[in-house]
Image: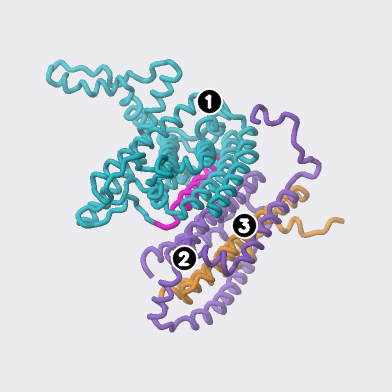
């Protein structure tokens, strides 16, 4: 692994532990933003340039702003109440370790002995430029693309309907634009 | 060795643009606002330097002229004053986040200069020099991404201020910035549809031609509506001009800036002026042909053609900086709900319809 | 272990960290953020697979996962806001009882 990959992976893992570990939910949110930016850097190093920039625009730039908005509007404090006991935490981490070993060992064992030549060739072929992904999206995955736009529409409508207050009518006010026609 | 020289050239160009132009914009703002408001402005510091020695006195004449114009006041004295002020961190909030907020607000703006070309490609000492720092193929999308990340500096600044004015100001500023990213993104998509590439250099290259032999094929000819939408959306995104409710001094006691003093405040301020320079550069590159002189064709790849092109680009950038400063000091401020109405109910549908018409026209023609 | 498969190991590690966070935390927004982290780990695995196999299908899958995550985050946070309005807290232990 090159130096840049190592640094970005270390930042990603450290900020992931930070998301889980911080008491204050705002610190968790900023840790997650750092994690998303580190993962975007890893995508760029893997050759998926369009995905790296998309990750910054969509995840770190929009979804986390939404999370920050909700956190600031609700003005949340740290978790109150009983803290989870040390026995429970250790048990959870132990089971997590078991799960990690059981999912990573077969995956790594299967891909551990790839011939180097095909690996190089495949790495060249999967440079994720915008044009290449666009061609694939609009030809082979056209139906999924249209369905995903439908999912986004449902998401927008659902979010507005769920989040508005129940006794407010969403109707335009009289003369409410105040000069901006 | 040659690569090092080319790298130094690129560093010089970008630093020139981002930092020097950003600082010069502060001076332009001070003197320009003074001219617009029919007063003189700053002209005291350094204007009365005098020496008994006649030879030294003659050498001090350019210094006195600079002081008379207000350059020393803005560029030297303000910075020294900012450095010397007490650095205040409000209690009850995280010191680290409070100190990081200006950095997070300014760093993406500086990074966004990396993908914008500053001169046509030219050959120097046998190497082809791309006059941009990072020629990635998702050029404009990177600028949009950096605009999205710059929102967090404002959110951090407001939250760590730990008082109601800061939080309200920062919530308003964040809502304004993310609302106006949408028309900006749609205008970028219309430009991508016309020019067929996300790379800004390709877009500028394609603007060098002439439409029907007479009119230069600039972006503003292809997309006049897109130009107006980007002008408005960009000024709202940089919280400049009539859209500066979140940071105006008479509203909310300076909004999210409230708890910042000294050098951190100046860093926010410098970031805002660098954003002015970035936005002016975007307008000049995307809509006004970049380094294109309308009916003149310069030979490609020659170093003096690149120099002339860079000078033309800088002239256009300075024009747009001055335009933004003049707009800011001429028009009164929008109210917050007027601002959000303009963004969501006017600019977004206009940008969408513009995109649809552009796409249909591109397919049919 | 060559560099590409180490990405798979990182993805598995991030997935389990997200899963551990999902089990340990009680704040609804932090739970949501742990789910986002698990989705990101899966995205990383997809991109690594796309590099191993040499075609772009993995990256298109990541694109769709991002779209779905955006829609899901909007609705999830709207649900959290609604629950906050009725229960006045977003800890999951406070909303554990049905209304009587």
Quadrant location, the N terminus of chain B: bottom left
Please tell me the colour of chain A. Answer: purple
**C-alpha span from label 3 to label 1:** 37 Å
Residue A9 point in image, percent of width and height: 45, 65
Label ID, residue B173: none
Residue at x-position 34% and y-position 50%: B132
From the image, tell me which residue sits under label 1.
B331
* Total marks placed: 3
Q: Is residue A45 above or below residue B277?
A: below
Q: Per the image, is A63 magenta?
A: no
Q: Magenta stretch: give its range.
A: B136-158
Label ID, residue C70: 3
Q: Is residue A13 above or below residue B233?
A: below
Q: Tell me the quarter of the picture where residue A164 sits.
A: top right
Mainly helix, strand or loop, the magenta region? helix
Q: Tell me the quarter of the picture where residue A72 sits.
A: top right
Please tell me the colour of chain C. Answer: orange
From the image, tell me which residue sits under label 2.
A128
Colour cyan maps to chain: B
Residue at x-position 48% and y-position 62%: A131
**C-alpha span from label 2 to label 3:** 21 Å
Q: Residues within 10 Å of mark 3 (few under 14, many from 20)?
A: many
Q: Are marks 2 and 1 in contact (CB under 8 Å)?
A: no
Residue A79 is left or right of residue B207, and the answer is: right
Q: Is residue C34 above or below residue B336?
A: below
Q: Residues within 10 Å of mark 2 (few under 14, many from 20)?
A: many
């Amino acid at each position: 692994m090159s130096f840049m990959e190592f640094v970005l992976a270390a930042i990603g893992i450290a900020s992931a532990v930070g998301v889980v570990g911080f008491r204050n939910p705002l610190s968790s949110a900023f840790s997650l933003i750092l994690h998303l930016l580190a993962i975007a850097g890893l995508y760029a190093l893997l050759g998926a340039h369009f995905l790296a920039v998309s990750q910054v625009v969509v995840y770190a730039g929009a979804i986390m702003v939404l999370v920050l908005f909700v956190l600031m509007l609700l003005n949340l404090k740290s978790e109150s109440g009983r803290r989870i006991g040390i026995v429970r935490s250790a048990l959870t981490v132990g089971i997590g370790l078991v799960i990690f070993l059981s999912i990573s060992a077969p995956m790594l064992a299967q891909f551990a002995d790839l011939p180097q030549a095909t690996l190089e060739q495949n790495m060249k072929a999967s440079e994720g430029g915008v044009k290449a992904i666009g061609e694939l999206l609009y030809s082979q995955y056209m139906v999924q693309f249209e369905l995903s736009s439908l999912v986004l529409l449902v998401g927008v409508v659902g979010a507005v309907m769920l989040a508005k207050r129940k006794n407010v009518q969403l109707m335009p006010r009289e003369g409410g634009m105040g000069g901006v026609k | 060795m040659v690569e090092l020289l080319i790298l130094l050239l690129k560093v010089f160009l970008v630093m020139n643009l981002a930092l020097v132009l950003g600082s010069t914009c502060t001076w332009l703002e001070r003197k320009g606002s003074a001219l617009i408001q029919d007063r003189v402005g700053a002209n005291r510091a350094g204007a009365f330097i005098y020496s008994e020695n006649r030879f030294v006195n003659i050498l001090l004449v350019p210094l006195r002229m600079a002081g008379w114009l207000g350059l020393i006041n803005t560029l030297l004295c303000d910075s020294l004053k900012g450095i010397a002020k007490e650095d205040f961190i409000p209690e009850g909030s995280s010191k680290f986040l409070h100190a990081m907020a200006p950095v997070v607000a300014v760093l993406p703006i500086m990074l966004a200069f990396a993908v914008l070309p500053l001169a046509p490609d030219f050959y120097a000492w046998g190497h082809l020099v791309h006059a941009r720092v990072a020629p990635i193929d998702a050029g404009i999308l990177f600028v949009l991404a950096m605009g999205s990340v710059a929102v967090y500096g404002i959110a951090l600044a407001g939250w760590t201020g730990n008082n109601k004015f800061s939080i309200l100001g920062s919530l308003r500023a964040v809502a304004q910035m993310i609302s106006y990213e949408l028309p900006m993104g749609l205008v970028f998509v219309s430009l991508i549809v016309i020019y067929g590439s996300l790379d800004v250099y390709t877009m500028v290259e394609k603007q060098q031609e002439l439409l029907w032999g007479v009119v230069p094929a600039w972006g503003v000819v292809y997309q006049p509506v897109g130009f107006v939408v980007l002008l408005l959306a960009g000024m709202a995104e940089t919280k400049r001009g009539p859209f500066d409710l979140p940071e105006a001094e008479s509203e909310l006691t300076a909004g999210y800036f409230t708890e910042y003093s000294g050098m951190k405040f100046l860093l926010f301020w410098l970031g805002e002026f660098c954003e002015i320079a970035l936005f002016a550069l975007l307008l000049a590159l995307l809509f006004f042909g970049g380094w294109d002189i309308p009916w003149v064709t310069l030979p490609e790849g020659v170093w003096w053609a690149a120099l002339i092109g860079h000078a033309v680009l800088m002239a256009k950038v300075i024009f747009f900086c001055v335009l933004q400063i003049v707009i800011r000091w001429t028009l009164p401020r929008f109210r917050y709900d007027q601002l959000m109405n303009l963004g969501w109910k006017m600019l977004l549908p206009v940008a969408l319809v513009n995109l649809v018409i552009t796409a249909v026209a591109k397919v049919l023609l | 272990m060559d560099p590409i498969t180490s990405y798979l190991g990182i993805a598995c590690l991030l997935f389990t960290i997200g899963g551990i966070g999902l089990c340990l935390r009680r704040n609804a927004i932090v739970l949501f953020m742990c789910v986002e982290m698990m989705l990101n780990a899966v995205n990383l695995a997809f991109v690594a697979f796309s590099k191993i196999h040499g075609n772009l299908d993995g990256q298109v899958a990541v694109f769709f996962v991002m779209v779905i995550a955006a829609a899901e985050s909007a609705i999830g946070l709207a649900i959290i806001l609604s629950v906050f309005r009725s229960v006045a807290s977003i800890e999951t232990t406070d909303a554990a009882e049905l209304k009587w």
